[in-house]
Structure formats: C-alpha cells, structure tokens
Amino acid sequence: MTRWPLLLFLPLTVFAQDDVWDDDAWEEDWDEEQQGIIWSGFVEAGLGTRFSEDELIDTRNTLEEVRWRFETEWQPGNVTVGLKADVDYDGIESDWDADVRDLSAGFTPGDNIDVKIGRQVQTWGTGDLVFLNDLFPKDFVSFFAGRDDEYLKAPGNAIRVTRFSPLVNVDFVWTPIFESDVYLTGERFSFYSPLAGMQVAPRPPFSAEEPEKSFSNGEFALRLFRTVESTEFAFYAYRGFSKQPPFVAMNAYGASIRRPAGPGLLNAETSYYTSQGDNDQLRFLVGYEWEARPNFSVGLQYYLESTSDEDRHLLTNRLTYRAGRDKHTFSLFTFYSPSDNDYYLRPVYTYRHSDQWSLAFGANLFGGNEPDTFFNQLDDASNAYARVRFHY
Amino acid sequence: MLGRFVFAALALNFAAFAHAQTLSDANDIIARADLAAYYAGADGRSEVRMIISDAQGREQRRQFTVLRRDVADGGDQQFLVVFSQPSDVRNTAFLVNKHIDRDDDRWLYLPGLDLVKRISAGDKRTSFVGAHYFYEDVSGRRPADDTHELVETTDAFYVLKHVPIDPQSVEFSSYVTWIDRETFLPMKIDYTNAAGNLYRRVEVFTIEEFGGHPTVTSSRVSDILTGGKTDMQFRYIKYDVDLPDSVFTERSLRTPPRDWLKRPAE
C-alpha cells in the first residue's frame, strides 16, 4: 500500500512535456505537427467489492488496484512500432504486475499486404460480448471484476498477415505458442467444479495443464472477408485448442454476415467446433441493433451453443443512453439463459468530466437457480465497482 | 498561347455570367450549395481542431484529419476521419461510405479492443465525439432528405427554408440556411424545434481559397438553449491529391494510411 503514491507520481514526468493544447491563443496558433515520440496513457484507480461475502475467498473486494498505462508509437522508416503497457499494483494479489498489451511492428511488404508482428490484441466476428469465431484470448477475470471493457480482450504473441484484394481480403493470424483465456482459478472468484461437485476456490489457485509450448501446438486463425454493397461477409477457420481448460485440440469453421436492415443493423454468425471425441458444438448467433430514440440504442442477440447432449440458449440485451454530448453514458448489458435459468447483468455509468478525467461506476450481478450454471456459479461474486481515470 | 488566352477569357466570362445570374429555383440552389460545401475537387484532405465548450465555459478539445473522395460529383462519397488528440481517442478512426440512394455505411474503429464497430443508420443526429456537431454534419445531409423553399434573395444571400421529409428521423422541425450567392457556401444555418424555438445555429466565420475552391476554415455550432458551443478550425487543406479508393476500407481503420494523413508540404 505504501508504494502506491510513488506510482502516482511516476507519470508526472510525462505530464511535464509541452501540452499541445495549452495555447490560449488557439485562434492564431496552429501547432506544428508532432514530431518524435509521443507518450500518452492514463493513471487509474479502481475499487470493487462484493455485495456479500464469498466464504471461500479471503477478501471481500473484487477490484483493488492502481494502474499506469503508457503508450507510444514510433516510425523508423516504413515500420510502425507500437507499445501499450500497464504497470499496476493489485491489492488483491498484493503484487505488482506489468502487462504489455501491445509491442508490435507493423509494415507493408507489398502494396496490398499488411503485416503486424508481436504482442497484440485482436478481434473479429460480429457478436457483442458473445464470441463464436473470435478465438483470440479473453480475460474473463478482468471482465467480471469491473475493469474497463478493453481488458476483456487479452493480448497474444502473434503474426498477422492481411492481404487486400477486390475479390476477397484474407486475414491470417499465426499464434506460434498457444494463448489461453484468463479463466477462473479461484484466486479472485470461486467457481463450480464439476469434478468436486461443489463450489471451490483451491489454494494454490487452480492451474490447468496447457498444451506443450511448441510450434506444433500453435494456433492458426483465418478470415476471408469482403463487403458487397452494404453487406459484410466473412468466412472463418481456426486450428488450435479450446481456450479454457481442459484445452482440447479443436478446429472451427464459420461464417458471418452483417448488414443494415430497417433502421438498424442485423448480424448473424455461425461456427462449428470440432474436436476429438464426441464434443462437436454448433454455435449460432443472430442480433439486431438500432437507435430506438435519439441517443438511446438497443441491441438484442440470440445465441445458441448446441452439442449432442444439450443446447444452451442465451439472450442478450444492450441498452445504451448517452446524455450531454456523451458526457454521461448509461449502459446495461443483460445476459439471460432460458435453458440454464441464470443471468448476468452489467450496469455501467461513465462520466467524462474532461479530456483528462473520467469516472466509471458499475456492477456485475450474477444469479440463477442451479449451483453449476455458468453465470450462477458466480453469484457470490456479484459486485459493484468504481474507477477514476486520469488521461495524459 | 492564344488558345489558352481565349479559354481563360471564356472561363472569366462564364464566371461573370454565373455571378450575375440570380437563381430562383430552391433545388438548384441547394444542389450548388451541396457541391460547394462537400464536393470541392475530386478529393481532399484537411486537419480539423474542435474546442467544445459547455455552458459553464469548460472546454474539451479534439484534433483529427479528414480524407474525402468523391465517387461521383454530387453523388456517393467516402470519408475517413482519424483522431490524433486527445489521448483517449488517439487512433480512433471513423469511416463513412455516403450513398445517395440509400443509408450511409459507417464504421468506428476502437483501437483498445481492436474492434471494428458498425454504426446503425438511425444514429446520425447525435453528437460526434462529444461535439455539438452531429455525425451527419461530417459527411453532409442529403438534399433529398428535405424539401427546400427559397424564402428570400438578398444582395449577398439566398435564404432557404428546409423541412424534413421524415420528421420522425430528426430533432428539428425546420431549418433556414443563408447561402452566399457568390461561393454558394452556407454561411449560417438556424434550426427550429417542434416548439417553434430556435435551438441550434451553425455559423461560418472564415472562408479561404484552396486550389480555386472557396473553403470554410473556421465555423461554430451553438446550442442556443443550453449555451454550449463547438468551434471548429480547418487547416492544411488540399484538394485533388489523388486519394485511391483503397484508402477508404477496413484496412485504414486498423492501419491508418500514414502517407495520406501526413501533413502536406505548404
């Protein structure tokens, strides 16, 4: 704890740089194009706590951290080198942590080819907080703990090659060493163990054996995409492992479409997961999003996970209301599964006070009937959080 | 040499004729104004700064570069907007495929999530990145979305009144535009709400010429009811830079086209 203030002062060295906005004589003064390396980022403090104790977890808090983000970009020749990293002190783990979200080199070896090598966050597919063909790593612990949505997407070390052509664009991502999701280990949240038949929070935290770190266990992800008129088409393929324990070798093949329909946007996506044994799964998603009133938008999704023994149905709803020119954003995301009879609500209010200061208040509310369903296993993790962020 | 002189003289005469002519058809005037405001050159680039002030005088700022390409003059267009300031929106990018015969296609790229987010068609008269400008103001409102009436012709302006064809889709019940008779640029726009009150005003303060095209370089949107305003400045404007079609694709959202975004030599 005593080390926090030090962390808070570190970025001051960065604030000391000339602020390009600080000229009062704006009318006369149009700044020079920024040269050299620019540092930016934020400092954020976050605190989240459970509504009630989880008797399996020592601490009631779900979020207790101060985080310093620094970002920069550098262009030696035709290469763009990007860096985006966090240093944080996590009070729950009582530990300092450094997390590089992006350290990559991007270049264009041919007119129609982009290459990005290194650590990077990647996203594709049409779902809103529901993922079918996006098998890039995700951090569900951050998501449930109340960190910014950005942290749901975990970085991976990969080579991405994209070739653009009028016929079809091809996106190819090779992740040489398998990157798993950040899954529930019992450290911050307890979870239901089908093996033990009960809720657990093992000490030391659960750690599943990952696929051996070899190139032969690397992940390949492919996307073919094209926009025709206003309709986006994409086809996907993946070879790797399920992203959560027990990390079964799997392939996935899928397709998606997204297009305007009526006043809003319609999307549909499907994916077929195939793995050894009899564990094939069909995933299907259809969604619609529209602005129901000025500044008030509604998104609805139906999502299906179908295996030979059972179907899991999920309905989601996103309501977003923005006021005061986006100064205030009220958002409620609801997951509800009629088949599991459980739910997960994510209300968030964000307040953008200025270009520097912003606040977020939110909650993660889980519930249901059965102890072993996906969302209801987290009912003791239901929490409310607050975050304050200073951008520099 | 002689041929060139004759051509120049003809062009001058034509210009003089155009200026002398008084238009009387509201649709002709709005078509000319749309071309002048949104279709200068075959393509263009500009850097933009905004100061957003609320009623208490608190300021926020935005800086971005806009690239534009016309598919056809007065027809479909493509826009790419890439933000450089403030730091929480740096590298956020906005792509518009503007269509005359159907709704525009719009995408927003959020670099933190590597997310290409599509924006629904209805969501156009809402704040553009916190400013008093709307998303629709970036690429321009289609003339066909309103009916136009010439209410007055003064020495300097054509004064037109516009009524939306689909009143449910917009927050105004009508607006009045003062169009400069010489440049055809709209110099002032007043919006009236359903209660009959003036609530929004767009004003142009400065016009400069680039590549022969009179161009707005300073303007303001005021929220008359709450007292907030957004001042906008445009610099490093250049037309006919031969922007290729390929700049206006998903590629540029993830990988901003540095060569085209770079500030041109004066």
Image (cartoon, rainbow, N blue to C red):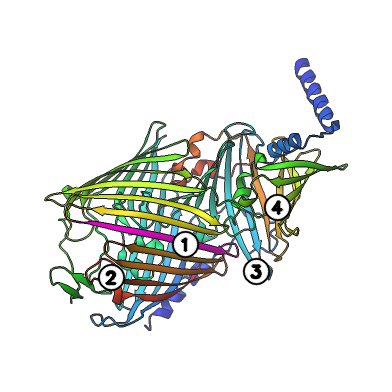
Neighbourhood count class around disc 3 (C-alpha, 10 Å): few under 14, some 14–19, many 20 upward: few
Secondary structure beneath label 4: loop
**Residue B173 image label:** 4
Q: Amino acid at mark 2?
A: Asn
Q: Residue at x 74, y 41 (%)?
A: B148
Q: Amino acid at mark 4?
A: Ser
Q: Amino acid at mark 3?
A: Arg
**Residue B58 image label:** 3
Q: Residue at x 53, y 56 (%)?
A: A292
The quarter in which the N terminus of chain A is drawn is bottom left
The mark closer to the camera, 3 or 4, is: 4
Instruction: Indicate the quadrant where residue A77 lies.
Output: top left
Residue B112 x, y percent position in the rendering: 42, 57
Q: Which residue is mark 2?
A: A376
Secondary structure beneath label 1: strand
Residue A125 vertical placement versus B244 (above, below): below
Q: Which residue is mark 1?
A: A319
Q: Nearer the viewer, residue A279 or A286?
A: A286
Protein chain holding label 1? A
Residue A71 vertical placement versus A351 (above, below): above
State how far apart marks 3 and 2 are (Cα): 45 Å
- Nearer the N terminus, badge 2 or badge 1? 1
The mark closer to the camera, 3 or 1, is: 1
Secondary structure beneath label 2: helix
Protein chain holding label 3? B
